[in-house]
Amino acid sequence: MSGSTHSNTPAPLRLAVPAQSDSIERLAIAFERSAKRWEMVAYPAMVLFTVIALFGFYKIYSVSENMRIMAERLQPQMGEHMDKLTQSMESLTANIAQMSRNIDMMQQRIVTMSNDTNAISKQMSTLTTMDKNIAQMNQSVLAMTAHTDMMRWNMATMNRSIQRPMNFMNSFMPW
């Protein structure tokens, strides 16, 4: 019995060794197949990523080159626009100075009108003449109001015409 017990013990060991090496061999084959599948996915993905990265670099380079060319082309025109703006500002300054002189002259005329009004009040007998002078003065004030409104409208129009090109130019300014 002991001989047969002894012979039974090694027999299962012999069967277990081939089964264990067989499962390791199957695991190795499955791992190789899996690795080949990953190689079929990973290598094309790496090539595709490299191509996309190169294309992205090319696009960034071409956009920056185009921006440089645009900046070079706009720079001479900007000088011309700044000259025109300077001329417009000088003209505006001259017009404002003229307006100031006109206002000074109007003040002098108002002083004169005040003196005339005092003289008229002293001469109440000539009320009709005074009434006509006041009507003329009202018309003058209305004309001044209309001219002042026209000057306001002209200033607003000039502001809008300068504002559009300056907004466009300021979008390209680096500061």
Image (cartoon, rainbow, N blue to C red):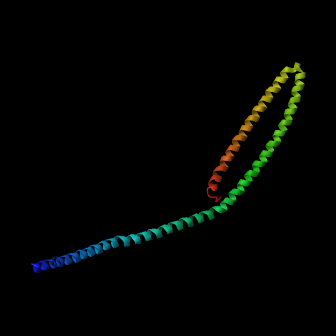
On screen, residue 32 versus residue 122, left or right, reads left
Taking the spot 34% from the left edge, 73% from the top edge, the residue there is 39
Q: Nearer the viewer, residue 4 or 123?
A: 4
Taking the spot 69% from the left edge, 59% from the top edge, the residue there is 80
Q: Provide residue 122's location: percent of width, then percent of height.
A: 90, 22
Relative to 25, does residue 141 appear above or below in the rendering? above
Q: Quadrant of residue 112?
A: top right
Q: Residue furthest top?
A: 125
On screen, residue 151 versus residue 104, left or right, reads left
Q: Residue furthest left?
A: 1
On screen, residue 129 versus residue 71, left or right, reads right
Taking the spot 71% from the left edge, 54% from the top edge, the residue there is 85
On screen, residue 84 versus residue 16, left or right, reads right
Task: Tally the numbered discs.
Answer: 0
Q: Residue furthest front?
A: 2
Q: Quadrant of residue 81?
A: bottom right
The C terminus appears in which quarter of the rendering?
A: bottom right
Q: Nearer the viewer, residue 14 or 116?
A: 14
Q: Nearer the viewer, residue 157 or 19?
A: 19
Q: Provide residue 114's location: percent of width, then percent of height.
A: 86, 29
Taking the spot 74% from the left edge, 51% from the top edge, the residue there is 89
Q: Nearer the viewer, residue 13 or 46?
A: 13
Relative to 83, does residue 114 appear above or below in the rendering? above
Q: Provide residue 44's location: percent of width, then percent of height.
A: 37, 71
Q: Provide residue 1's location: percent of width, then percent of height.
A: 9, 78
Relative to 20, does residue 164 appear above or below in the rendering? above
Relative to 90, does residue 64 appear above or below in the rendering? below
